[in-house]
């Protein structure tokens, strides 16, 4: 490979003067022309939404209403009463997960537990 080549494309950066000029002209602001008509705003955009209104359910609300498979809800914590829980065997990504041999042992997720 010669000093003028780099990698497998020896012609990189070696375009014709006409191609370079066309590229320069294409990216000039005046080449863009006038902007198009734009889009029609939706009814919600026109009328607005009141402050604080949410159109979706938050995670805390979902946790109160639906039990997530593989999770046990333990309680709530903090001033916000956010629900918290722990993983069960159903939350494991392992094949045919098994519980601990000793019922007093913690239930650990699948994976390398060798340390």
Image (cartoon, helix red, strand yellow):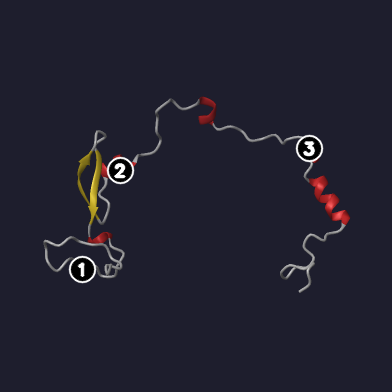
Q: Residue at x 83, y 59 (%)?
A: 15
Element at badge 3? loop
**Could you tell me if the residues under marks 3 and 2 are in contact, i.e. CB atoms within 8 Å?**
no
User: Residue 85: x and y, percent?
Assistant: 23, 49
**Total marks in image:** 3
Work out which quarter of the rendered image holds the C terminus and state it.
Answer: bottom left
Image quarter for residue 13? bottom right
Residue 2, labelled with which disc? none
Element at badge 2? helix
Q: Residue at x 24, y 68 (%)?
A: 97
Q: Is residue 52 left or right of residue 92?
A: right
Closer to the chain start, of discs 3 and 1, is 3
| Residue nearer the viewer, 22 or 1 | 1
Closer to the chain start, of discs 1 and 2, is 2
Q: Is residue 27 left or right of residue 41?
A: right
Element at badge 1? loop
| Residue nearer the viewer, 88 or 105 | 105
Closer to the chain start, of discs 3 and 2, is 3
List the residue tagged with mark 1.
Answer: 98
Residue at mark 3 to residue at mark 2: CA–CA distance = 50 Å
Categorize mark 1 by other alpha carbons within 10 Å: few (<14), some (14-19), many (20+): some
Q: Is residue 95 left or right of residue 13?
A: left
Residue at mark 1 to residue at mark 2: CA–CA distance = 28 Å
Q: Nearer the viewer, mark 1 or mark 2?
A: 1
List the residue tagged with mark 3.
Answer: 33
List the residue tagged with mark 2.
Answer: 62
Q: Residue at x 72, y 36 (%)?
A: 36
Residue at mark 3 to residue at mark 1: CA–CA distance = 67 Å
Image quarter for residue 14? bottom right
User: Residue 58: x and y, percent?
Assistant: 35, 39
Residue at the right extreme of this rendering: 18
Q: Nearer the viewer, mark 3 or mark 1?
A: 1
């Amino acid at each position: 490979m010669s000093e003028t080549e780099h990698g497998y494309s020896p012609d990189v950066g070696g375009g014709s003067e006409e191609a370079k000029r066309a590229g320069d002209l294409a990216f000039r602001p005046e080449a863009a022309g006038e902007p198009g008509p734009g889009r029609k705003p939706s009814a919600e955009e026109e009328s607005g939404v009141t402050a604080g209104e949410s159109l979706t359910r938050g995670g805390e609300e979902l946790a109160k209403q639906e039990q997530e498979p593989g999770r046990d809800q333990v309680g709530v914590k903090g001033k916000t009463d956010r629900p918290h829980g722990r993983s069960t065997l159903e939350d494991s990504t392992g094949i045919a997960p098994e519980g601990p041999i000793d019922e007093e042992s913690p239930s650990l997720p699948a994976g390398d537990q060798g340390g």
